[in-house]
Image (cartoon, coloured by chain):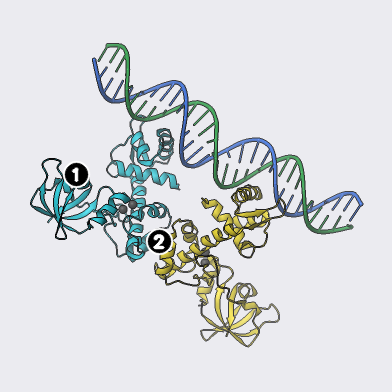
Chain colours: A yellow, B cyan, C blue, D green
Amino acid sequence: MVTLSEENYLKAIYHLGKQGSIAVSTNAIAEQMETKASSVTDMIKKLADKDLVNYIKYQGVSLTKEGRLAAAMVVRKHRLWEVLLVEKLNFSWDEVHDVAEQLEHIKSEKLINELDAFLNYPKEDPHGDPIPDKDGNIKKVEKILLAQVDAETSCICVGVKNSSKEFLQYLDKIKMALGSHIEVIDKEPFDQSMIIKINNQKLNVSTITANNLYVKLV
Amino acid sequence: MVTLSEENYLKAIYHLGKQGSIAVSTNAIAEQMETKASSVTDMIKKLADKDLVNYIKYQGVSLTKEGRLAAAMVVRKHRLWEVLLVEKLNFSWDEVHDVAEQLEHIKSEKLINELDAFLNYPKEDPHGDPIPDKDGNIKKVEKILLAQVDAETSCICVGVKNSSKEFLQYLDKIKMALGSHIEVIDKEPFDQSMIIKINNQKLNVSTITANNLYVKLV
DNA sequence: ATATATTTTTAGACTAATCTAAAAATATAT
DNA sequence: ATATATTTTTAGATTAGTCTAAAAATATAT
Ligand SMILES: [Mn+2]
Ligand SMILES: [Mn+2]
Ligand SMILES: [Mn+2]
Ligand SMILES: [Mn+2]
């Protein structure tokens, strides 16, 4: 049995080191989870006792095979629930996260697999993030940050790096959504902000925005 | 803020005294929740501090207006989730309870109201139990136990009193479901067991069964 | 290489929810 | 009405998860 709190730590480690395979520091976990480092150390010991993480004192933690699968299942659930909320229950992409944080801890294999089928086996969540399959595997799609795109180049919005309510609502305001066609017209030499064309409208986006939007070239 | 554990106690009190309006004993709650009486006393004090229950030492507890609404919302969520599981996610009526026990604690008003709409405002759950509305009101339908039905009388199965996996699976086996038309042929004078006709098949059901099946006369 | 700064761990305390055992209150039976 | 049985509460302990403050280990800078 993995507790709710343990699941949250596993997920944090999963997100911080690429799928938990590289070691992450106590402080990094503490910051991600908004707890204290001492709490993290305590929990790491419990996870190590359960063989869910590899832990060497003062050297950080990584996920074991078992821990990685457990973490991937939490992420799978989180993202599938987000799809249900948006596709079937009229939630917008900036409203789903807090509810999904709760739903990701519901324990029922049948439930999650039926949900997957009901939603037609989606490959991505409403923020463009990949949904792990039953075995924890994710489809790696190459995507780059908008900031990396050269002038006079076209691309399509495929994800967000920052999925805070504030950023998502800003994107709504400028009518940017997953699938939006973006034409990079130019970069302002002064501050590197980008002049882009979207929905036949020219607009200027800051480097902060350009560094939080994933795109693929067309 | 009402904790998960507090919600479970409120629900138990709600179920034991008609919607929590009549006082229920410490031991009754302990039995229902499979805990010890001392734990119940502790929790009752917390609920009383939060004005969710009326409590006089040694005299049992009843729900306050606020407590009754909180309990009704848990029941509402439990039953709406059960409908989703059965109607959309291929669960059978004997599989839903444990998952609904978890889902009933998810906190999101929008979620539960969207779910209600998505399911087309169901009035009953898969076991024939009424679903409280947003204000906690339930539609009282009169239903009687099959055991109360006289010989040579027709009725329709509308609910189960006992919703254990074992009983529900037995009902599946004899092809009894909500909506099934039942004709009471006779009662066996020896043991009060009933000879009924269902789906044009005659069969005999024990008094235990007859005392756990709700029907309405046609 | 040594001093200083940062990170991590340990020690000890707190809260929520539970338990066992004993004490107190209430109910029941003669 | 009194003794006995039952129910309920209290007292004290335990576990999971968290915290603060101090100690220990590691990293960084001169
Ligand atoms: Mn999310
Ligand atoms: Mn997401
Ligand atoms: Mn149920
Ligand atoms: Mn039910």
According to the picture, the residue beneath numbered tag 2 turns out to be B111
| Label of residue B61 in the image | none
Q: Identify the amino acid type marked 1.
A: Thr
Q: Is mark 1 within 8 Å of ligand 4?
A: no
Q: Amino acid at mark 2?
A: Leu
Where is residue B118, by image quadrant? Answer: bottom left
Mark 1, residue position = B207
Indicate whether B211 appears above or below A112: above
Category of crowding for the residue at label 1, using alpha-carbon neighbours closer than 10 angstroms: few (below 14), some (14–19), many (at least 20): some
**Residue B61 spot, x, y in % from top left:** 34, 36
Residue drawn at the location 63% of the way across and 65% of the way down: A18
Q: Residue furthest left?
A: B152
Which residue is painted at 10% across and 41% down in the image?
A: B189
**Side of A51 relative to B75 (left or right):** right
Helix, strand or loop under label 1 = helix
- Could you tell whether A80 is left or right of A206 in the image? left
Q: Secondary structure at mark 2?
A: helix
Q: Chain of mark 1?
A: B
Residue appearing at x 40%, y 65% in the figure: A114
Image check: A3 left or right of B22?
Answer: right
Residue B53: x %, y % from top left: 36, 40
Q: Quadrant of residue A83?
A: bottom left
Instruction: In this rendered view, identify the residue nearer to me: B87 or A56.
Output: A56
Residue at the outermost bottom position: A152
| Residue A8 visible in this rendered orientation of the protein | yes
Which chain is mark 2 on?
B
Q: Nearer the viewer, mark 1 or mark 2?
A: 1
Residue B60 place in picture, x, y as percent: 33, 34
Q: Tell me the quarter of the picture where residue D3 sits.
A: top left
Q: Is mark 2 within 8 Å of ligand 1?
A: no
Report whether residue B2 is seen.
no
